[in-house]
């Protein structure tokens, strides 16, 4: 019984240390698109109520490691990756030509509210193929 209590305290301590050591929300840049660089800003999404788990756990839209996913506009237009939320209902649509500049910045300026999170350098490489 005493051993179970010690184990429970140890487990709680380990879980809390894991939360403290979690990486803070930041920016991830994606290059390689003819439409311009895309900057995913996790803080902008968090400020709107999104949690890391919303995209990285349930549902698992993106891997946690940059470069693990190959993001394409074709996939996003089919509701995958950024397109799961950026559908014109929950957030601006990845399909709307007028909204391209919300993520794609010519000259590499980046985007504050952009999409493209979780992928690699090809985050929007297929943008010109819309």
Image (cartoon, rainbow, N blue to C red):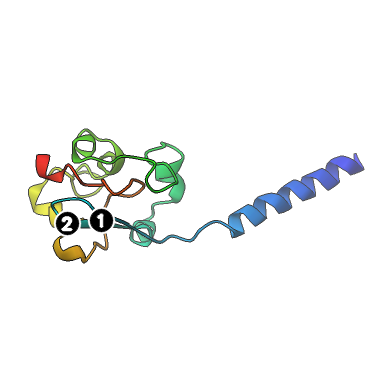
Q: Of callouts 1 and 2, which one flags the residue occurring earlier in the amino acid sequence?
A: 2
Quarter holding the C terminus is top left
Q: Position of residue 81 (x, y in %)?
A: 30, 40
Check residue 91 in the rendering and tell me which mark sits there, or answer none. Answer: none
Q: Position of residue 86 (x, y in %)?
A: 24, 45
Q: How many marks?
A: 2
Q: Position of residue 37 (x, y in %)?
A: 21, 57
Element on which disc 1 rests: loop
Q: Position of residue 16 (x, y in %)?
A: 66, 54
Residue at the location (78% across, 45% down)? 8
Residue density around tag 1, few if under 14, some if 14–19, many if 20 or more, within 10 Å? many
- Most distant residue in the left direction: 98
Instruction: Note whether 105 is above or below 68 in the view shown.
Output: below
Q: Which residue is mark 1?
A: 114
Q: Which residue is mark 2?
A: 36
Q: Whole-Å distance between the Cαs marked 1 and 2?
A: 12 Å
Residue at the location (44% across, 37% down)? 58
């Amino acid at each position: 019984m005493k051993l179970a209590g010690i184990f429970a305290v140890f487990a709680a301590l380990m879980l809390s240390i894991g939360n403290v050591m979690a990486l803070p929300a930041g920016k991830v840049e994606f290059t390689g698109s003819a439409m311009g660089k895309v900057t995913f800003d996790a803080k902008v999404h968090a400020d709107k109520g999104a949690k890391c788990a919303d995209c990285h756990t349930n549902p698992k839209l993106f891997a946690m490691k940059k470069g693990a996913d190959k993001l394409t506009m074709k996939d996003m237009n089919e509701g995958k990756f950024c397109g799961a939320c950026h559908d014109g209902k929950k957030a601006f649509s990845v399909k709307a030509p007028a909204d391209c500049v919300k993520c794609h910045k010519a000259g590499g300026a980046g985007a504050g509210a952009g999409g493209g999170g979780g992928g690699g350098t090809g985050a929007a490489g297929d943008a010109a193929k819309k």
